[in-house]
Amino acid sequence: MRYGVLGTGAVGHSIASKLVELGHQVTMGSRQAGNQAAVEWARGAGEGAAEGSFADAAETGEALFNCTAGTASLAALESAGAEHLSGKVLIDVANPLDFSEGRPPTLSVCNDDSLAEQIQRAFPNVRVVKALNTVNAEVMTNPAAVPGDHDIFVAGDDAQAKAEVRSLLEAFGWRTILDLGDITAARGLEMYLPLWLRLWQSTGTAQLNVHVAR
């Protein structure tokens, strides 16, 4: 399958590399084609890896990952072009972290809205699924980095899109995938980040996750 990965940071690198490892064709997108980080990734990732602009990645990909900084995600998707996004599954991994006042960051949107909902409203023909935003880049694609049973979550309005994402997450190695319901559940997933940041600070490791015991 062909994937477009929007974003050249640690999350984009981790997801794009895993997709190539699984045999998919991947275009990593950035603001402009020729981005140094994307070029270096494509050169080292092997056959099936390419780079380009946000629009290139969105047009080429049959399904897409939003791995951009949350506060820049809407602008990045606008740059990708609504015509290239329409009808496609968009896995939104981003968090609306606002570092303008320093650290720890606040959330630029919360409580009665979420970044994922903003994306869904801005691009109503896109099948947005919130997933993977509650763990760090390595754990996203290598859940075994955290020992024992632990959980990942999905949320979105399109049941078929969530089923497709679930299959991909299973290929990433996830065993427990909890469907939290429609896209409004992304509010809770994004508001978990302040707690996750404190857990990282307290434990001294970002390789951590939660398990829902029932």
Image (spheres, rainbow, N blue to C red):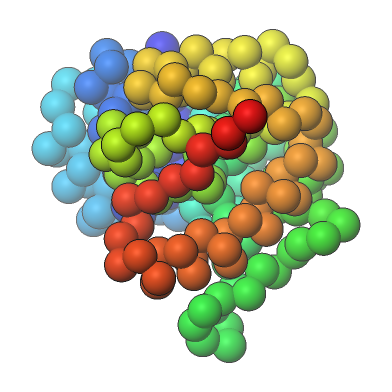
Residue 63 seen in the current view? no
Say which of 132 and 176 sits in front.
Answer: 176
Please provide percent x and percent y for residue 9. Answer: 35, 54
**On the rendered structure, is 28 left or right of 155?**
left
In the image, residue 136 sits, relative to residue 126, either above or below, namely below
| Quadrant of image for the N terminus | top left
Q: Would you identify the image quadrant in which residue 138 lies?
A: top left
Looking at this rendering, what residue extends furthest in the right direction? Answer: 112
Count of marks, rendered view: 0
Q: Residue at x 58, y 66 (%)?
A: 194
**On the rendered structure, is 46 left or right of 73?**
left
Please provide percent x and percent y for residue 29. Answer: 41, 43
Please provide percent x and percent y for residue 80. Answer: 57, 42
Say which of 90 and 131 sits in front.
Answer: 131
Please provide percent x and percent y for residue 91. Answer: 57, 33
Q: Residue at x 65, y 20 (%)?
A: 162
Looking at this rendering, what residue extends furthest in the front direction? Answer: 214
Q: Residue at x 56, y 76 (%)?
A: 105
Q: Would you identify the image quadrant in which residue 161 lies?
A: top right
